[in-house]
Image (tube, helix red, strand yellow):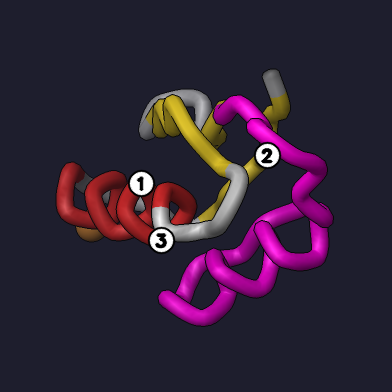
Amino acid sequence: MATVKISGMRCGHCVGSVSKALSEIEGVSNVQVDLDKGQATYDEKQTVSKEVIKKAIADIGFEAE
Ligand SMILES: [Cu+2]
């Protein structure tokens, strides 16, 4: 399981957007977004570059580290 910190999420709508964006990345599954912790966890069915994850999150207006 991988974890990514995400800043800028404020509500359930943000959680939904992040969850959808991550789920659409090839190789990513079981996405769980935690609003209170400001992070998402996911499983990798294949190796997924952290840069790909960061870009997908940046593309929808949030910041990942
Ligand atoms: Cu929101």
Please name the amino acid that badge 2 sits on: Val
Labels 3 & 2 near each other (Cβ < 8 A): no
Q: Is residue 43 left or right of residue 24?
A: right
Q: Which residue is mark 1?
A: 19
* Front residue of this view, candidates 32 and 6: 32
Q: Which residue is mark 2?
A: 4
* Front residue of this view, candidates 29 and 65: 29
Q: Is residue 6 left or right of residue 60?
A: right
* Residue 60 quadrant: bottom left
Q: Is residue 54 above or below residue 55?
A: above
Instruction: Classify 10 Å Cα crowding around label 3: few (below 14), some (14-19), many (20 and above).
Output: some
- In front: label 3 or label 2: 3
Labels 1 & 2 near each other (Cβ < 8 A): no
Q: Which residue is mark 3?
A: 21
Residue depicted at 48% across the width and 52% down the height: 22
The mark nearer the N terminus, 1 or 2, is 2
The mark nearer the N terminus, 3 or 2, is 2
Residue depicted at 80% across the width and 54% down the height: 50
Residue 5 pos. (x, y %): 66, 41
Instruction: Classify 10 Å Cα crowding around label 1: few (below 14), some (14-19), many (20 and above).
Output: many
Whereabouts is ligand 1, in terms of quadrant?
bottom left
Alpha carbons under labels 1 and 3: distance apart = 6 Å
Q: Is residue 16 above or below residue 39?
A: below
Tag shown at residue 10: none
The span picked out in magenta is: 42-65
Labels 1 & 3 near each other (Cβ < 8 A): yes
Q: Secondary structure at mark 1?
A: helix
Residue 12 pos. (x, y %): 17, 43
Please name the amino acid that badge 3 sits on: Ala
